[in-house]
Image (cartoon, rainbow, N blue to C red):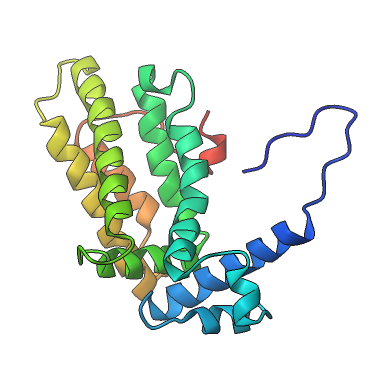
Amino acid sequence: MTEPTPAGQTPRRPTKGQRTRASILDSAAELFSKSGFHAVSIRDIAAHAGLTHAGLLHHFPGKESLLIKVLGRRDRVDAQLLFAPGVEERPEELLGIVVGFVWRNMQTPGLVGLYVKISGEAADPEHPAHDYFVQRYRLLRERLTQAFTALFAQADPPLAHAPELVAGQLLGLMDGLQTQWLLEPDAVDMHASVVAFVRQLGLTIDLAPKEPNDAA
């Protein structure tokens, strides 16, 4: 996500170094999503990006740092939405943002494949992305638990679900659907399945398909 350019100012073009770093991250994301973290070398990524091994290391110190940067690019955008001012006091909007991530992911199979492959590998405590995924799931569970706690209490009559359990169930559903969707995209509608889950809880808030950036 880029910040809007102030009125009257020409958008600033990225520097050569910024363009090179973006190309490296694009190459790393593509190769990691195809082959996983362990099967890809720094030389593979450098060659894919049209650089020498030394040229890549001028921008990134190693494969581990590249992986974390790749995983964090979209998370920075997501975090801006999840922690936008006032969102915590609007549980309908917070849940809508998370469901919006599902719709957005259906447009980006490469990144979905990367998350599925790397998150499976990262179950190993020695994997460089292990702590990243632990923190990511912990954060999402906390935010969703807050939202479900408020939404269940607001319902008339109040809904007798355990918010923390429902938060974990929703994340588990989202992850499982991603695998099914990657295998057979025409047969699995991730967004519709997640909306159906929310409806089965007794919640009737608006979860119409939309990009996360529109979930204001």
* Apparent side of residue 40 relative to residue 59 in the rendered image (left or right): left
Look at the picture and state if 6 lies above or below 79: above
| Residue 90, percent from left and from top | 39, 20
Residue at figure coordinates x 78%, y 55% from the top left: 15
* Apparent side of residue 110 relative to residue 156 in the rendered image (left or right): right
Look at the picture and state if 202 lies above or below 169: above
Look at the picture and state if 43 lies above or below 114: below
| Residue 3, percent from left and from top | 68, 36
Residue at figure coordinates x 66%, y 75% from the top left: 55
* Apparent side of residue 160 relative to residue 174 in the rendered image (left or right): left
User: In this view of the protein, which residue sits in the foreground, 19 or 149?
Assistant: 19
Q: Quadrant of residue 175?
A: bottom left
| Residue 209, percent from left and from top | 48, 44
User: In this view of the protein, which residue sits in the foreground, 58 or 115?
Assistant: 58
Q: Quadrant of the N terminus?
A: top right
Number of numbered tags placed on the structure image: 0
Residue at figure coordinates x 50%, y 78% from the top left: 42
User: In this view of the protein, which residue sits in the foreground, 71 or 99?
Assistant: 71
* Apparent side of residue 106 relative to residue 170 in the rendered image (left or right): right
Q: Is residue 209 visible?
A: no
User: In this view of the protein, which residue sits in the foreground, 93 or 60?
Assistant: 60
